[in-house]
Image (cartoon, rainbow, N blue to C red):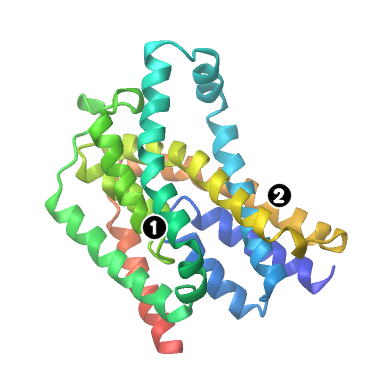
Amino acid sequence: MSSDIVKAFILGIVEGVTEFLPISSTGHLILAGKALSFTGESAKVFEIFIQLGAILSVVWLYRTKILSVVSDVGTKDANRFLTNLLIAFIPAAVIGLLTHSFIKKHLFGSFTVALALIIGGVLILIIERVVNPPRGERGGLEVDNITYRQAFGVGLAQVLSLFPGVSRSGATIMGGLIAGLDRKTATEFSFFLAIPTMFAATSYDLLKNFRELSISDLPVFATGFIVSFISALIVIKAFLGFVTKHNFSAFAYYRIIFGILVLLLL
């Protein structure tokens, strides 16, 4: 087994485990890639590609809901669900297009990622202390019943995740709690929102970097993709069970400790 296959396996696990937890997959991939000396243009495309594996795990896990929405397009419930996704998707999509080049050029560094991890962890702790989300089992909102205003609030929070190290899932889940969603609903809406957001972002990046791909990279890319899919599927199921009984403080402390360690190593 070549060293690149081993690195792809490790990075696939890193992506799958961190993508949907509020700890920043981008930050972990940047740091893991440097630790494994897996860098360069091809490595950047690889990191983009394996995100597709993580996205497909959400599609697979929620395939029944997705197929139901697609088959019911035109009905009130399906239209409301799709409209909420669109409302939440637009802010980051617009600002991301305008700032994409600047972010890629100036913010993808170990120092900025470490700071974002620490600051994000502190903000999660503050939100956990200030916000008292409703209990889902006691009348909390379901994903289908989210209001347009709440969806827009989550969309605004997602803009913060354009900064590497913030965490897309962390920003959207916290945004959901601030908007009045219970933990499980905020988490599930974050997962659904990841589908159009990540598909758009990865497709855009892959098209821009298509020339960096070659047939010789196929085994490495396939390994990372499959491992990312499987590990993300496992983590999502466990995470949904976790949020029904616990808050997000543990992830906040992890972010802070990990961020400080990175700064010390720098």
In the picture provided, is 58 more to the left or to the right than 206? Answer: left
In the picture provided, is 143 more to the left or to the right than 227? Answer: left
Rendered residue at 24%/43% (across/down): 177
Where is residue 233 shown, x and y percent of the image? 57, 43
Which residue has dot 1 on it? 161
Where is residue 38 shown, x and y percent of the image? 68, 75
Considering the numbered disc 1 on the image, is that residue within a helix, a strand or a loop? loop
Rendered residue at 36%/69% (across/down): 117
Q: Nearer the viewer, mark 1 or mark 2?
A: 1
Where is residue 25 shown, x and y percent of the image? 50, 60
Amino acid marked by disc 1 = Ser
**Residue 226, disc:** 2
Which picture quadrant has residue 48?
A: bottom right
Q: Residues within 10 Å of mark 2 (few under 14, many from 20)?
A: many
Q: Are marks 1 and 2 in contact (CB under 8 Å)?
A: no
Which picture quadrant has residue 140?
A: top left
**Residue 199, disc:** none
Above or below, 136 relative to 152? above
Which image quarter holds the C terminus?
A: bottom left
Q: Nearer the viewer, residue 210 or 237?
A: 210
Rendered residue at 20%/45% (across/down): 178
Q: Mark 1 or mark 2, which has the lower sequence index?
A: 1
Which image quarter holds the N terminus?
A: bottom right
Q: Residue furthest left?
A: 130
